[in-house]
Amino acid sequence: MNPPDTPTAGAGTDPPDYQELFRQFKGQEGELISILVRVQETFGYISEESVRQISQFLRLSENQIFGVASFFSKFRFDEPGRKSIKVCMGTACHVHGGGFLSDTLGWQLGITVGQSTKDKRFDFQRVNCLGCCALAPVVQINEKIHARTMVTQLKEILQNRE
Amino acid sequence: MNTEQPPITLSIDNRTVTAARGATILEAARAHGIEIPTLCYLAGLSPHGGCRMCIVEVEGVRTFPTACTTPVEEGMIVRTRTAQIEAMRRDILQLFLTEHTSSCLVCDEKAECKEFMPTIRKSGVTTGCRYCPKDTLCELQAVAESMGIDRIDHPIYYRNLRVETEDPFYDRDYNLCILCGRCVRMCQEVRTANVLAYKNRGRNTIIGPAFHRTHMAGGCEFCGACVAVCPTGALREKARAWEGKPDREETTTCSFCGVGCQLRLLVKDDRVIGSLPADDPVVNQGQLCVKGRFCNTELVSGYRRLRNPYARYGSIPTEISWDQATALMAEQLATCPPEEFALLASTNCCTEDLYVAQKFARVVMRSHQVDTTARIFYGPAFDPYLRLLGRSVPLSALSAAEVILAVGLDSRFGRSVVGVALRRTLKQGIRLITVNPHRHSYSLLAQIWLQPPSGGEAGLLRSLLDRVQPAAAAPAGASAAGRDSDLGEAARLLRESKRTVIMIGSEFMQCDGAAEILAILTELADATGAGFMPLPAQNNLVGSLTAGAYPEALPGGVPLDDDAHRRLAEQIWGVPLAPAAGSWNAWQLWAGQRSRVLYLLGELPPTPAVPADFLVFQNIYPPEPYCTADLVLPAAAATESDGTFINGEGRVQLVRRAVPPPGNALPDWEILCRIARRMGAAGFAFTSAEEIRAEMGRFSDAYRREADLARRDPRPFHWGGRMADTRPGGRAETAAGPAARETYRLTVSAVEHSHRGFPLSVWVEGSRMLLTEGMLEINPDDAAAAGIAPGDPVTVVCGDAEMTWPAKLHRDQPPGTLHAALRECACIRPNPQTVSIRKAHV
Ligand code: SF4
Ligand code: SF4
Ligand code: SF4
Ligand code: FES
Ligand code: FES
C-alpha cells in the first residue's frame, strides 16, 4: 500500500510486530519516550493501535501516553503521506509570506499541519529554515526544493508532483 | 510525623507566624488568616504552580516564588501584598483573560446592568447577560473582581474551540479553560482513572483523553470529580448548568448500591439540583460514582413524578384523594384471603418502609407472602450470597490487605468509589488478582488477570482452590482455563498472604454456576483466612433482611421457624402469627401464579400481563408502559423521606429528608400505615421513622442503641435460615452443546443499575449511553462475519424460543460469546446457554 518512496515512512508492509519491538524494553514507565521513538522509527508514525499496545505493555493509560507523546513535536499521529510537503517558516520565508503559503496549502489539501490527505498522497508540515533563505519563500516536496513559490503556483506544483 | 521537629517561625506581611516544617507559604498564610489569591491550588491535590496568582515576595530571593509550591523556611520574610506583586498579578490575570471570553467581567454596561437587574414587571424576566453557567460561582471571576479588573490591556486572542457536548452528564467548553490542571490532577491523582491529560504544547495545549476521543471512549467513569473542582465554567454539569447557587446542602446516603456513599444534596427552592460527595472518612472518602453524582438528581426530579393517587375506572385513570385511595384498598383487602395476597417490595426502600411492609402483610393480612426482587436478582445464588454477608469485612480492610482477589468485578460505572479505594491500595504495593472473562476496569492494573471462558469461572476457581489447598497433591484439572503459570502464581500469592480480601462483583451472579462459584470462594476463604467484600448491588439488601421482608425471615433477620423469635414477634405485635409460609416466594409471581391482590412496593411487575385481580402500584413514577395498575399510589423518593439503609458492610446509615415530596406523595411507610389504620389494625400509629426504628430495636440488635446508630462500626449480617430456590424453568446446561460454527455462548444478566424497579436509563437521560440494557453485546469481528451493524435488530434463537435485541458492538466481548443485560429475571432459562443468531427481518 505504501510505496517506500516517502522519506519518513520507514515502515514496510509487514504486519506490525509489537512483541518483537518491546522485547528490548523492561516495561517500565521511564522507557515511554524511548518506546515511542522506536515505534515511530518502525512504523513511521504513532497510531491508535500503537498507543493501545504500549498501554498494555507499560500498563499506563492510553490517555497519559498520548499526553506525553503529543507534547513533542517530533511525534506524529497520522500515517505519513507518500509525498511529504514542508513549508518553511524560517525568518526569511516567513517575511516573504511562508505563513500565507502554509494556509493556502492547508486549504487546497483540506488538512492542517501534521496531517496527511485522506488518499495518503501528501502530508504537510511546517519547518524552520531549510537553509536556502535566498530562495525564500521555500516549499520542499520530498527532496525537491521549490524556490520563490507563489501562492498561485501551488496548484500546479502539486499536480506535477503526483 | 513531624511532631518532634520544632515548628518554623517566619514573618508574613510583618506578622510573625509559625508553621509546621514542610508546609508551604500558602498554607502558613491561610492558617493565619492571610489571604493570597490562588487559582490552580486545591487542597488535597499536589501543588501545581501553574497559574502564578499566588506569587509572593521573599526577602533575599530575586524571583517571585509561588506561595503554593514554596516550603516555609526558618526566618523567612514574606510579603504578599506589595504594589509590585499586585500589579504583576493583575497583569497575569489579564493575560488569562485575553484567551478567556470574559463578558461577565469586562463590560461597559456593567455598573448600570447590576443596578437595573432587578426589575418590577408582571412576569419574571431575565435582565442582564448570562453567558456562562458558572456565573456567580466562578473562582476566576471572584479573583478578577477582588483585583478590580475592569479592562484588558492586551490584544484578545480567543481560541475558538468547539464546545464538546457529546458525552453524557457534563459538557466541556475549553474556551473557558485556564489550564489550571485541577481536573487533570483530580482524575490522575485522586481518582486514578487517568482519563484526562494535557495534550499538545504551548498555545495549543488542551485537556482531554487520547487523540480526539470522547470521554466515553477514553474510559471516563463519569464520576464528575473533575467537574466539581473546575474553577471556571469550562466543565459544567448538563443538568445543573444554569441553576446558580444552591440555597442549602443536606447530607444523606446514596440509594443506588450497597456501598452506601454519603452525599451532599444541593437544594434550591425545595428542589434537589445536584449532588456532591460528602467528605465522609469511612465509606466514600469524598468520592462518588456516576449514579450518586449525576443519576440521583435527574431521577428524583423528573417531571413525570407521581403527585396524586389514581385509580382506574374501566380504562380511565382518575385522580383520587388519599381518603378514597385508602378506602379502595381497604375494600379490596378485606375480602382477600392471606394466601392470595402478595407484597413485592424493593430493596431500594428504607429499612423502616420494609419493616412496616412486612408487618402489614403479617399483621393485617395474616400472610407471610412478602418478598423482594433481590431473590430474583441473585437467582440460585441468593442463599449462599446471604451467608457471605456474615463474613463481610469493612471497606477499610482493603488498605490493610496483602492480596485482593476480585471476582467478576468491574467498577467503571457502578461502585467506582470502591475502584478508587482499590487503585489507591495498589499504589501501596498490594497485589491484585482478578477473575473476569472480559476486559474490565482492572485489566491493566491487576498483577494477574485470570481470564476464564464465559461461564467457566467455576472451573477456573476450582483449579485455583486445588492449587491453594496444601493437601492438593497434583493439580488435577489440567484442562482448566487460563495460563497455568498465572494460576500457579495466583495460588502462591493467596497461600502466602496473611490478609486476603475477596471482592465479589455481580458479573457472574445470574449464571447458573453462581452458587457453585460462591461455594468455592467460601472454601478458598476458609483455606486462606480471607474476608469477603460482597458489594451488593442493592443499597439496602441487608436492611431488607433486618426488616424481615421475606417469607422465610422475621424482623431481625431471624428465620421464621425460630420459635422463640416467633413468640417475640407475637408479643410485640400482639397478634398470633400465621403458621409457616408454605412454599410461596417471589418466584411464584414470575412463574405466573395468580394472586387476588398484588402490592408492588417500589417494584415493577414480573410481566406486563400481571397475574393479579387487583394490582397496587406504589412508586415514584407511573407504571406505564410496564403495566397498568388498578391503583397507583405516589411515594416519596429517597431524598424526600427519613429513614435508614444498611450497607453491604452492615453499617447503619441515615437517609434524610432534604426536600418535600412532590404533590401529595407520601413516604412508603406512611401510606402503608394509613391503609392499615383504615382497616382497623392496631400497631400502625407511627408518626415518624424514628418511632419505627424504636419498634425494630426490640427485634434487632442492629437498631438498638439508637443514639449512635450512624457512628457505629459495621456489623456483618448473619443469616441462619435458608432461602428457598424455587426457580421455575431451566437449569444449567449439562454439556456445552456441539461447537457448531454459528453458535454462540449467550450470558444474560440482570441490570443492577435499577432503582425502585425502573432501570435508570428509563428516567435518566445520560445513563442511556452508559448503562444500556436490552442490547445484544457482540464482538465486532463476529458481527462483521454475520453482517451485523451497530443497532441492527438481531434475533437470538435458543431451542424453541426467540428474542430480538438491537446489536451493540463491543470490542471487549470475547469472540463467540454474546451478552445481554435485561431488566430482571434473566435467569429463568439456562445461563449461559448455546444459541444461534440471525439478522431479524426488518
Ligand atoms: S468524570 Fe471522573 S473519570 Fe471522567 S474525566 Fe472526570 S475525573 Fe476523570
Ligand atoms: S477544565 Fe477547568 S479544571 Fe480543567 S484545567 Fe481547565 S479550568 Fe482547570
Ligand atoms: S458507589 Fe454506590 S453508594 Fe456510592 S455513589 Fe455509587 S451507587 Fe451510590
Ligand atoms: S527561512 Fe526559509 S529557508 Fe531559511
Ligand atoms: S495557586 Fe499557586 S501557582 Fe496557581
Image: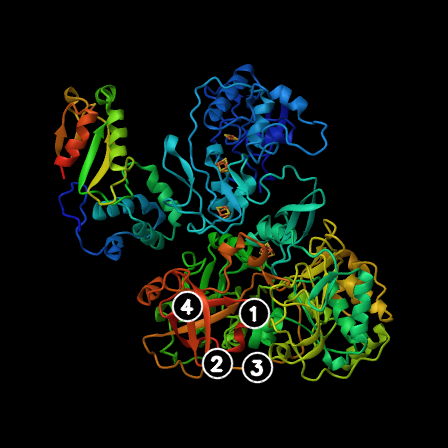
Q: Gap in Å between the C-alphas at discs 1 and 4?
A: 20 Å
Query: Which colouring convention does the figure follow?
Result: rainbow
Give x and y (percent) for residue B108. 56, 18
**Callout 2: residue from which chain?**
B
Check mark 3 vs ligand 3: CB closer than 8 Å? yes or no. Answer: no
Give x and y (percent) for residue B77. 56, 21
**In this image, B621 relative to B565: left or right?**
left
Q: Residue under label 3, please give it.
A: B728
Same subunit, tags 3 and 1: yes
Q: Gap in Å between the C-alphas at discs 3 and 2?
A: 12 Å
Tell which circle, 3 or 4, labels the residue nearer the N-terminal end: 3
Within 10 Å of disc 3 (Cα), the crowding (few <14, some 14-19, many 20+) is few
Report the amino acid beneath label 2: Ala
Q: Residue under label 2, please give it.
A: B732
Q: Residue under label 1, please give it.
A: B824
Give x and y (percent) for residue B95. 46, 23
Tell which circle, 2 or 4, labels the residue nearer the N-terminal end: 2
**In this image, B97 relative to B279: left or right?**
left
Check mark 4 vs ligand 3: CB closer than 8 Å? yes or no. Answer: no
